[in-house]
Amino acid sequence: MINMRVLVRTDASVDIGSGHLMRCLTLAEQLREDGAEVSFICRDLPGAMFDMLQSHNFPFGKLPPIQFSQELDAQLTISTAQSLFADGIDWVVVDHYSLAAEWEGLLRSHTHKLLVIDDLANRFHDCDMLLDQNYYRDFELRYKKLVPNFCLTLLG
């Protein structure tokens, strides 16, 4: 991987927990080890764990703490991403239960590829790749009608 630029959009707080951030941090560490430039964008929530990102030397941008519509969140994410990556983004990784196809569609023109990390299988996604690391009965079918036909699903 040479000069790949990866933006991670996730949140962590005392209310929603740290799982999203921790699994994204694990992925980000591996991507960076492989030569990628990785930055995070998170809402500035109580217990948001920005100190964790700082201690791992990841650049990050903060969004205001209030929950926005998917459209406004996408607009703020795009403008914040432009300050982190002046030369554009190759991949957006999103791990967030409140973001779905509408948000992802708005990010499409600002990145080459979208990776969604999800484990609910309860909403549509507009992504190139979807990761659900959990094992479920009939896991191969969980996202069949929730992602585009071209989407690579990594399941179980």
Image (tube, grey):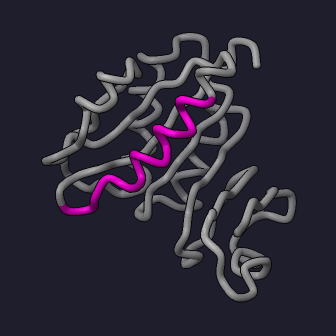
Look at 66% across and 16% down and name the residue there.
35
Find the magenta span and give its range: 15-30
Determine if the magenta segment contains residue 16: yes
Query: Relative to 23, is 72 on the left or the right?
Result: left
Which quarter of the rendering shows the C terminus? Answer: bottom right
Residue pushed farthest right? 150
- Quadrant of res 83: top left
Which quarter of the rendering shows the N terminus? Answer: top right
Q: Between 148 and 38, which is closer to the camera in this rendering?
A: 38
Give x and y (percent) for residue 17: 28, 58
Residue pushed farthest left? 46
Q: Is residue 156 above or below residue 62?
A: below
The tally of labels here is 0
Query: Relative to 153, is 88 on the left or the right?
Result: left
Q: Is residue 108 above or below residue 37?
A: below
Look at 56% across and 74% down and name the residue there.
123
- Quadrant of res 144: bottom right
Q: Is residue 84 above or below residue 121?
A: above
Give x and y (percent) for residue 76: 37, 36
Give x and y (percent) for residue 5: 62, 21
Query: Relative to 94, is 63 on the left or the right?
Result: left
Q: Considering the whole magenta stretch, tell me its main secondary structure.
A: helix
Q: Between 71 and 97, which is closer to the camera in this rendering?
A: 97
Query: Relative to 31, is 103 on the left or the right?
Result: left
Look at 50% across and 37% down and name the residue there.
8
Look at 32% across and 53% down and name the residue there.
18
Determine if the magenta segment contains residue 113: no
Give x and y (percent) for residue 25: 46, 38
Q: Is residue 152 above or below residue 136?
A: above
